Image (cartoon, grey):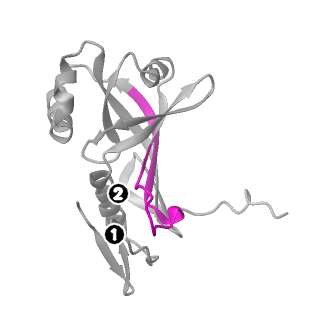
Amino acid sequence: MLSVSVITNRTPYLYSGVNRTMAAALTSQDVQDAWSALAQDIRTAVLLTMRHGGPFGSHVPYVFGSDWTRAYLHLSRLALHTQHLLTDPHMSLFIAEPDGPGENPLALRRLNLQGNAAPLAPSGPSYDRIKEHYVARFPQAEMMFGFGDFALWELRLEEAHFVLGFGQAFVSTATTPTRWVHQKVDRQAVKKD
């Protein structure tokens, strides 16, 4: 298991350890390292598709491309989530570290990505490389690449929201995927009772 530790102002923040002390200002590289560690540690995500005008969640294995802006799924055409994507390609991919005894569930690392999905053509220039990457991470999936109803799907992700713990929420966009900005609260949207 990959463990990334950032020391800022002598306050440790272990991304894959038990210690969840809040870290001071993190750099974009720190956030890059943290999302990479999360993606390495957690091999499945929740794919949210649109069904009858509302969100529908499915548990899916995934691999990323060179950054968070491209992810790849191996999906069966018979699955509901695939049928949803064929109707409406808008989707979200949610990756979160699991809860456990002694953990504060509100301080768990989580990454929410939004974008569109499309099948990846087997004749495309990147297909073989992505298939190899997927099978390396999920060897048991190799057999399913021979099934006619399965296809690789490319998630073209546009926005990312990454939470590392209390006060540590960051956003990024596909136009500048390595630039992570600390999330600011929209004060006008917050109403006092």
Spot occupied by residue 127 in the image (x, y as percentages of width and height)? 19, 27
The kind of secondary structure element at disc 2 is: helix
Which residue has dot 2 on it?
35
Examine the image and state in which quarter residue 79 appears: top left
Vertical relation: 30 (above or below) 119: below
Decide which of 65, 103 is in the foreground and name it.
Answer: 103
Q: Residue at x 33, y 25 (%)?
A: 75
Residue range highlighted in magenta: 94-117
Vertical relation: 152 (above or below) 169: above
Q: Residue furthest bottom?
A: 10
User: Which residue type carries mark 2?
Assistant: Trp
Spot occupied by residue 129 in the image (x, y as percentages of width and height)? 15, 33
Q: Which mark is residue 149?
A: none
Examine the image and state in which quarter residue 148 appears: top left
Q: Residue at x 41, y 55 (%)?
A: 98
Which residue has dot 1 on it?
17
> Which numbered mark, 1 or 2, is in the foreground of this view?
1
